[in-house]
Image (tube, rainbow, N blue to C red):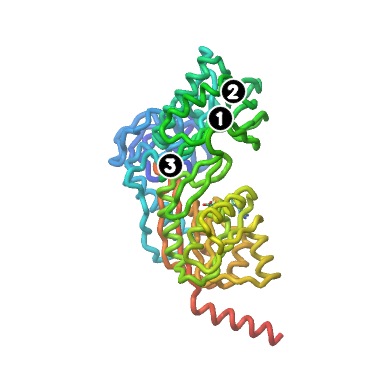
Amino acid sequence: MKKDDMIELTIEDLGVDGEGIGKLDGMTFFVKDTVIGDRVEAKVMKIKKTYGYARLMKILEPSPDRVEPRCVHARQCGGCQLQAMNYEAQLRYKVNKVWNNLTRIGGLTGLPRPEILGMEAPWRYRNKAQFPFGTDKEGRPVTGFYAARSHRIIPCTECWLGVEENQMILEKILDHMETYKIPAYDEQSGKGLLRHVLIRKGFVTGEIMVCLILNGRRISAQDALTDSLREVPGMTSISINVNQKNTNVIMGSEMIPVWGQAYITDLIGEIRYQISPLSFFQVNPVQTRKLYETALEYADLKGEETVWDLYCGIGTISLFLAQKAGKVYGVEIVPEAIEDARRNAALNDISNAEFYVGKAEEVLPEKYEKEGIHADVIVVDPPRKGCDAACLETMVKMQPDRIVYVSCDSATLARDLKYLCGEGYEVKKVKACDMFPGTVHCEVCVKLEREKLSDRKILMQDVSEITI
Ligand code: SAH
């Protein structure tokens, strides 16, 4: 087989970025824009020893799960890798992927396929959107999304994952730019003013925030723009973020308030959060609530426990747990997130949560070895790479009764579970949660309990250490 050959194959699985995977003559082919179950004709673009990449030419027989993407830009954008698959099939795919990783990488034999918490309406779930601005060939301002793997803007003010207000806000800003001849920022020359617009909405409170990210400190006819944006129902916060660096990082560090409050407020469950333009906040609050309620259920708190929440971010899980625990300690590497966590604790009159800035793999051993702190329950919600080995080791040494592992990558989750299961813990419950419908991502929550047998093993080790 060689480049440019036409091949026919059936798509059997999806790769990490949602690309279809099919097999032919012992070779594995990756074919973008296909769905599991499609029979396709594809052109070989690149070929290696055991695998290759091919371009979809024709769908010979569509998968029964194939649907027309709701967004006309789905293929170009690449943000929603699974939009051509019906929602049930998306959920099925995610469950299978989690189950495969947990059984194959994690060695969890006999695990039933986990339940997945899906969304009733898997659209318009994102409470945050960041739109880049640019200039089209006719010299007019445009906004939309970057075409996959480039910084070319495809004009589009309507994204089905975002809230309806986004479109109205973007059109008001584009109008203002045309009226007052305000140039969009140009990455090549470093000239121009408007770089990005950040929009956030509190799903429970209805409050809306607009933050203009400028290569400068103010925008022409700022009052006229403010008046226009204030017409959007729910608008409570308008601000400018200054970013004058020639960089891919969207936001700069300086904020200039323009109108209203410097933050919006929203709730997840009973807990209230103040969210500023620079704060981290989970983007799908409806599913976040379901996921963190699962974490709380798995923590199985009676009211007196000492709980550690590692990789705690702005403390969303910590504050959830604090309602039911004796004491919660949160650990997070980003200092600003910890500032938010402390402020949110105070905002909710939660006084039994304490937060530390630092790496989980450094803070936990230090607190355990030097201060002898203990844990009844440890909750972790690490980034994609999973928990650091030193962190896992200390967790095991601390012998919490339960460990609740919240994960956004089931492969690294499986690796870490394998370690924990080898050190005396047992997986009791697993539930997946679809935080990002339309995309390949999937969150998982796992409950582990310390095995009774391991109590004995650890006791024996202690005894032998003493006799030596
Ligand atoms: N539960 C959190 C989100 C967790 S996302 C919330 O709802 O806010 C994972 C977090 O781990 C991020 O905030 C990231 O900054 C943090 N992080 C990454 N590496 C870390 C490390 N080594 N130690 C502690 N925190 C870390």
Q: Can residue 154 be seen in the rendering of this structure?
A: no
In the rendered structure, which amino acid carries the disc numbered 2?
Ile
- Disc 2 Cβ-to-ligand 1 distance below 8 Å: no
User: Quadrant where the C terminus lies?
Assistant: bottom right
- Of residues 183 and 100, the one drawn nearer to the viewer in this rendering: 183
Q: Find residue 129 and report its horizontal and vertical position in percent.
A: 48, 36
In the rendered structure, which amino acid carries the disc numbered 3?
Thr
Q: Are marks 2 and 1 in contact (CB under 8 Å)?
A: yes
In the rendered structure, which amino acid carries the disc numbered 1?
Leu
The disc placed on residue 439 is: 3
Kindly state the secondary structure of the residue where label 1 is placed: strand
- Of residues 251 and 435, the one drawn nearer to the viewer in this rendering: 251
Q: Find residue 167 and report its horizontal and vertical position in percent.
A: 42, 28
Q: Which residue is found at the position 59% from the left and 54% from the top?
A: 342
Q: Find residue 71 and report its horizontal and vertical position in percent.
A: 37, 31
Q: Which residue is found at the position 59% from the left and 64% from the top?
A: 392
**Residue extending furthest top?**
138
Tell me the residue that label 1 is attached to.
Answer: 212
Real-space Cα distance between discs 2 and 1? Answer: 9 Å
